[in-house]
Image (tube, coloured by chain):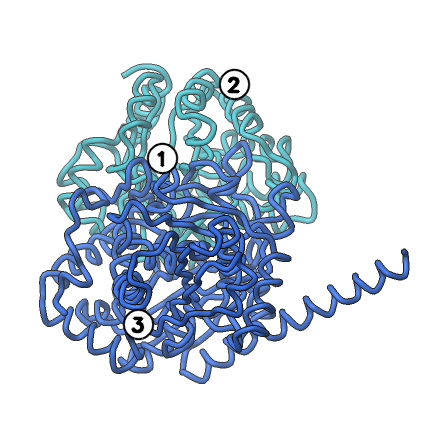
Chain colours: A blue, B cyan
Amino acid sequence: MNSQFFFPALPGESPSEHGYFGAFGGTFIPEALVAAVDEVAVEYERAKADPAFAAEFEQLLAHYAGRPSALTEVPRFAGHAGGARVFLKREDLNHTGSHKINNVLGQALLTKRMGKPRVIAETGAGQHGVATATACALFGLECTIYMGETDIRRQAVNVARMEMLGATVIPVTSGSRTLKDAINETFRDWVANVETTHYIFGTVAGPHPFPAMIRDFQRVIGVEARRQIVERAGRLPDAAIACVGGGSNAIGLFHAFLPDTDVRLIGCEAAGHGVESGKHAATLTAGEPGILHGSRSYVLQDDEGQITEPWSISAGLDYPGVGPEHAFLHDTGRGEYRPVTDAAAMRAFRLLASTEGIIPAIESAHALAGAIDVGTELGPDGLIVVNLSGRGDKDMETAARYFEQDAEAARAGRVQK
Amino acid sequence: MSGNLRLLADTLARAKQENRAALITYMTAGFPTVDDGIAATQAMLNSGADIVEIGLPHSDPVLDGPVIQTADEIALRGGVRIADVIRTVREAYQATGKPVLVMSYWNPIDRYGAERFGGELAKAGGAGCILPDLPVQESALWRETAARHSLATVFVAAPSTTDERLRELTAAGTGFVYASALMGVTGVRDAVSTAAGSLVRRIRAVTELPVCVGIGISDAAQAGRVARFADGVIVASALVKAVLDAPDAAAGTATVAELTTELSRATRRHAD
């Protein structure tokens, strides 16, 4: 494995020098942050060219995160997906329980290179916060995590994990008190403390170079999955499917398949109570181009550019923006983006648990619901790789509450009949 | 130079001739209501403010501290629209003939249409915009629009801005340079950062544009200190906080007028 593995120079590779994927990306940030963001970009270019950096990253992924992650075929689940062959890329088996650790280890190494003693990060579901707190413990960095008050309530276990790992978790009480507001607050901290602090952004959004850099740290998912599926099934898949909030696990899976134009790249967005209900987080399905958190992409906004509040049962997908490279893949047609409701995701959540003994994160359950539909469309000859981006331990309380309410609603329905 | 960009430049030049710093004050449009916001803005201009900034409320004000965040939230909950912001500019300008700037994050203007916004702002008598999340490298489209309508494009310079970038943003900017007194979001602070003085010196080395200092200046003593080395003193959160803390809108406007008068005296004191 060499640095080309992680940091490939693909023909026609995006982004542009100024961080644009087509019309999307850029650096829409306060002047006070320009020097810091430039420093990240310069240091990242240096790191990419340094074989020692790639070697250290590879060692951490192998011996700390536990890569390569397994590719598991799930035939009993696939019986409910039109009989297509379905393989899961098991990012849930990584240390800390999700794909987030890949990016965090890369950025923690970069933080060390920049000589900064302090790290800040936002978190929604808590997976990125836990991964960041973990890396900070490992590297001896001071760690502060911003988390919306609403998310702190729905992800209490992850809050306890972050605190056990030595991080300070700061509740965010502005706006909708979820991921979007946690990012705003982390940027505010960064503006004030930029000299000592690196912001380990968690997804492929934000100002350049974050979308490209985080993609590069996550692309190991697709590189491994591509090799594994060819070994196991003897061919490339018909579709690679992942859930999309900001889009880091999705771009991580998709990127290695970009040149394989016969492989459909399918992103599943959170449709909440349904796109038509207005209570959703399906940014590419229902949003419009705009600027949020430092880059131009699709955003959920009103007619005067105010960002609207998203909704999803999944804290990790409850975000009104999406990474600029996904906006580009959406507009060029290379990526397909589909809305998946809370109800469909929770059906897939229970189905995977009961047929395969794997409890997925609710985020990843959106991709599983997408796989059920795509498998049904493809039929028994279909071959699908799904990114199981995280495990569901953190979601047990949310799931229990959801299924209880669901059962109550069903009972009430029967009484009415 | 023409239109109200000229008015802005003349206002700053006149303050300099009078051997004092200009006083630039801020109020969020639509806060707590559109009419109250207009009253507070006019009160500032009638109590010694030379220039005002009207804040266009945004759902995601990443460069603002809790005070302006709260004002934005109240204004948006009250249903403020861009038309109300334009009306605030118009009524402030018509009542006083003084330069009125809009402070806005980029997405609302991008969504509204830069040309449409620039045209309406100029027609209302506005003098230009400060766009805190539109750094110079992303600003080409807006600058063309601003030039077409004789509007100023005021860039923020931070203590972390390199000399090379200072040259770039002062070459692209018009009206004045907004020097951020410290690394941080807007808000009331106990002491003015020492970073401001050296930043102003670095800016003056690369441009003839007036340099006005803001962020974290909240009382007359701080304004007086900054007035010794800056062409203008910018006060925002302290005035918004006065409205936020007032028992009713009339009391808020009265406190804003008092505070502006004190600040205005402080910016003149160094000439004594």
**Mark 2 and mark 3 on one chain:** no
Which residue corresponds to mark 2? B94
Query: How many neighbours does mark 2 have within 10 angstroms: few (below 14), some (14-19), or many (20 or more)?
Result: few
Label 1 is found on which chain of the structure? B
Q: Chain of mark 2?
A: B
Residue found at x 30% / y 20%: B147
Q: Looking at the image, which residue is at 30% across and 24% down?
A: B9
- Looking at the image, which is closer to me, B28 or A78? A78
Distance from disc 3 to disc 1, alpha carbons, whole Å, reads 39 Å
Q: x%, y% of residue A339?
A: 53, 48
Task: Name the residue nearer the viewer: A98 or A154.
Answer: A98
Q: From the image, state whether disc 3 or disc 1 is nearer to you.
A: 3
Residue type at numbered disc 3: Arg
**Badge 1 or badge 2: first in the primary sequence:** 1
What residue is disc 3 on? A118
- Looking at this rendering, what residue extends furthest in the right direction? A416
Which SS class for mark 3?
Answer: strand
Asked whether the beta carbons under mark 1 and mark 2 sit within 8 Å of each other, the answer is no
Residue shown at 52%/63% (left/top)? Answer: A365
Q: Amino acid at mark 1?
A: Ala
Q: Is B263 placed above or below A159 here? A: above
Residue A39, numbered label:
none
Circle 1 or circle 2, nearest the eye: 2
Could one spot residue B220 in this view of the protein? no
Vertical arrangement, residue B176 with respect to residue B267, above or below: above
Report the residue that reaches farthest toward the front: A381
Residue A198 lies in quadrant: bottom left
Element type at mark 1:
strand
Tell me, for residue B22, which label it has, or none.
1
